[in-house]
Image (cartoon, rainbow, N blue to C red):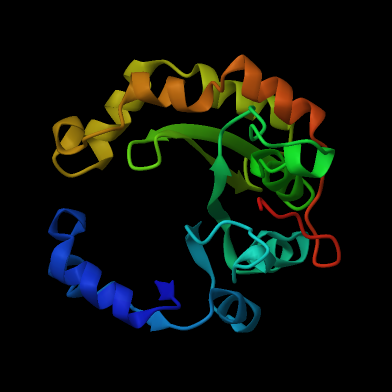
Amino acid sequence: MVDLDEKVVEVSVQILHEWGGEAVKNDPRFELITGDAYAYLLECKETFDVIVMDISDPIEAGPGVMLYTKELYERVVSCLSPNGVFVTQAGAADAVPPPHATTDKERDTICFGPIRNTLQEVFSCVLPYSQGIPSFGSDWGFVMAFNHRCAGDAKDVAAEWSSISPSVIDELIEGQIKGGESSLKMYDGITHLRMFNLSKAVRKHMERDTRIMTEDNPIFMY
């Protein structure tokens, strides 16, 4: 794990026991790297089966916007194994402009579409999905991207993920996750369908949004 703030990690280990706490920190597979994730990826010589990017939103005053660019995603590809998967948070899964918006720039503060679009410039299979986050009070967007299994039409892969039988997901959970379905608080086969079938309003909004995020043309939520 690469994190910029060592103190936040220390406090999280102490008080967020439901997230693993000391059990995670003491796992021999776990390595904590305190530093800038952007710099780490630029210099990284390793490859990973999964890279999960849960970082600050792309805001103008924040440190994370360069981690959402086409150039950075191209670097991510080189850090993945041949069957590797990349997942990133992608801001609010919303289609409603802020109530104060009076210009196109103010209305286009949702980055779910641009992040999806930018990943499609780099990866052959890109799957947007959403999940309600209680502490945020809204649905939140995520995007999964990979290059394997996409020799054919990427739309077929997306259709498979959004229509797979819940029983298939439930069987995979029982066979691959310690403790099976009862050990999970949120995810199961039915929830999977809800995650990968976005609302009509969000789908229409993302169809209209063709913006791409680059180092020379970053897009800010605010």
| In the displayed structure image, the side of residue 158 where residue 178 appears, left or right | left
Foreground residue among 70 and 172? 70
Foreground residue among 71 and 150? 71
| Quarter holding residue 206 | top right
The structure residue drawn at horizontal position 33% and vertical position 36%, both measured from the top left corner, is: 134
**Spot occupied by residue 64 in the image (x, y as percentages of width and height):** 60, 67
Is any part of residue 143 visible from this angle? no
| In the displayed structure image, the side of residue 6 where residue 185 appears, left or right | left
Above or below residue 141? Residue 16 is below
Above or below residue 155? Residue 210 is below
The structure residue drawn at horizontal position 63% and vertical position 46%, both measured from the top left corner, is: 148
Question: Number of callouts in the render?
Answer: 0
| In the displayed structure image, the side of residue 220 where residue 28 appears, left or right | left
Is any part of residue 186 visible from this angle? yes
**Which quarter of the image is occupied by the N terminus?**
bottom left
**Spot occupied by residue 40 in the image (x, y as percentages of width and height):** 56, 80
Above or below residue 33? Residue 70 is above
| Quarter holding residue 138 | top left
Above or below residue 54? Residue 105 is above
Foreground residue among 179 and 13? 13
**Spot occupied by residue 137 in the image (x, y as percentages of width and height):** 39, 35
The structure residue drawn at horizontal position 23% and vertical position 68%, both measured from the top left corner, is: 12
**Spot occupied by residue 47 in the image (x, y as percentages of width and height):** 54, 71
Foreground residue among 192 and 134? 134
The structure residue drawn at horizontal position 52% and vertical position 16%, both measured from the top left corner, is: 163
